[in-house]
Image: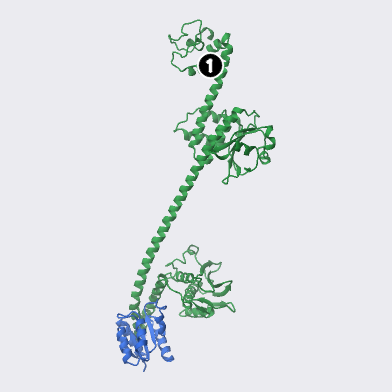
Amino acid sequence: MSEKLNCWEYRKCEDKSCPAYNRKDVYCWTISGNKSCCTGLEASNIFKKCLGCDVFRANALTGPAAGFMGLVKQLYIELEKSEAQLLLFQKINSLIHSTIKLDKTLHVILTCVTAGYGLGFNRALLLLTDETNSFLEDRMMVAPASREEAYRIWQELAEMDVTAENLPELVNIYENSFKASGKKYLSGKLVLALSEDNIFTQCIKDKNAIICDYKYRGRVPEAFLAFWGAGYFAAAPVLSGNQVKGLIVADNIFNNQEITKEQVDLLNSFAYHAGLAIENALLYKDLEKRAKELEETNERLKEARQIMMRTEKLTAMGEMAATVAHEMRTPLISIGGFAQIVKDKVKNDPASFKHMEIIAGEVKRLEKIIRDVLDFVRPFELTLTWINVKKVIESAVLITETGRKKKGSIAVFVAPGLENLKADEERLKQVLINLLDNALDSAKGAGVFILARREGANFILEIKDEGPGIKSGDADKVTRPFFTTKKNGIGLGLPIAEKIVKEHNGTLSIIPLEVGVLVRIKLPFSGRKS
Amino acid sequence: MKTLLVVDDEKNIRELYKETFEKDNYKVLLAETGNEGLDLAAQNKIDLIILDIRLPDMNGMEVLERLSAGVKEVPPVILNSAYPGYEHDSSVWLAEKYLIKSGDLEELKQTIKAVIEKK
């Protein structure tokens, strides 16, 4: 049927100015010798259509022009394939250059090497150099589940035009196909030294791709053979500028197809772009890291500024507290002193006596608060002398127990022959009193122990109570100023004790026990080092 | 009867000390300023001085130093202040004791007794 039709009839152009129009000697436009068709189509594009046209086939592939046209057709098919490949590489390149996440980039690169009729390898492995540039490590491997699947993904991509808008969509196709394979590649299975002389280092040195066949059999590292399971493959260096970034290894292990020179050339130019993309991704990663570091520094700076502001505020408040405390002291002396005088005078009036006792007692309490506040906010100097620890402990125990109903509940254990300690006697006593007060309060009738001993160059003092201990939420708060669980405390006992111990170059630690709490003080025997 | 000299610029404290120590059978002389105190110490036979540190005309240390220079037989001195922090002043060593003022006069009373008995 088609033999009797002109191509314009067959294709229904119906253009009367076509050179083939109404001619019976020339049926086909292609062989009419004209450069362009009257429909205005580009020569190459109309030629594509001619290849699928029955009129063209009937006229061009038979008769005298057949040999020549057959060649043209074959060349054209090659050209078409190259054109498609070129287009695809453009897509791949823009894709990998637009992907800044390293893993994504790497995966895109390997998929490109293996999928469909791109490079068409069965599988591909990417090796990257380590940070010290002395080893090649396997980073990622792609082997499609089946050729069909690979082809499908490739086809999908080939049909899309790459624009800024659909780039994310393209990336997603890669991503999803990656997920579909179900496995995330775990690197670290293969490490090759760059200092050795083998096929890979040669490939890197020459900066050129290589087909590794029987000629190179002896130059493939054993470790690689064990890992890869095949000795026939192509390898191309991944370079960025002069720097070696890694190596792409690919082969056709499933269909055993020969690796052609063309394939390797493509692999080579592809690896070059891959190098740039990896460099991009690494730079971006570095940038991200730097940004994060900067953010962290900024955060730390903010914290430091806050601490500084808090410290300044505390210092100002401390000064104010000290002034107020001082000013309160003098009137309190009069109140307390005269209360005592009146108290003695009203001995025979039990109600008034009790009231005066309360006044005197409360003045005492206020005086203690003032003393604590001043101790806490003011810097003090230590008067260091060699002191007998046992005596200091006994004196502190006596003072602590004074005014308490139950006496003798503190057990003292001082290591026999314990040497004298260089410390401020009064301050150390104050530490002991504060800690013993706490221990007795928290023991709630249970035992309290003091242990003093030497440990190397240090003096160790432990105060232990067998009370209900510290509530878990309070553990890190107890040394905070003004934190207290007591009705009558202002929460400075422990902070003052800690301050004094620190002045002595020692440490104070609070150790919650299964039963009760242990406070351990460690002091250097010879006093302050400074 | 032993004689105590109280040097303190706070009227209430002077009265408190006077009443308290007279009850304990001491003769009590009162001075408001350092100079007044030095004068009284020169004119009377004093057994013990209770000296405040912050005074309007001079501070207690200065009183201590002048006392040692001007009076033949220097009585023992108890420094008595609302303010800690003078412990490291070498002049403090001229005094028998450095006490922080308190509404509870027990410690002061005990110290006075001990110093006078020692003398």
Residue A74's x, y, as percent? 57, 18
Pointer 1 chain: A
Q: Colour of chain B?
A: blue
- In the rendered image, the quadrant that contains the N terminus of chain A is top right
| Front in this rendered view, residue A193 or A370 | A193
Q: How is the image coloured?
A: by chain
Q: Residue at x 54, y 40 (%)?
A: A103
In the displayed structure, A528 sits above or below A181; it is below
Query: How busy is the neighbourhood of tag 1: few (under 14 within 10 Å), some, or many (20 plus)?
Result: some
| Residue situated furthest top in the rendering | A24
- Quadrant assignment, res A251: top right
Q: Residue at x 52, y 25 (%)?
A: A84
Q: Which residue is mark 1?
A: A51
Residue A474's x, y, as percent? 48, 64
Name the amino acid, label 1.
Leu
Q: Residue at x 43, y 88 (%)?
A: B114
In the displayed structure, A62 sits above or below B73; it is above
Question: Circle 1 — which element?
Answer: helix
Q: Colour of chain A?
A: green
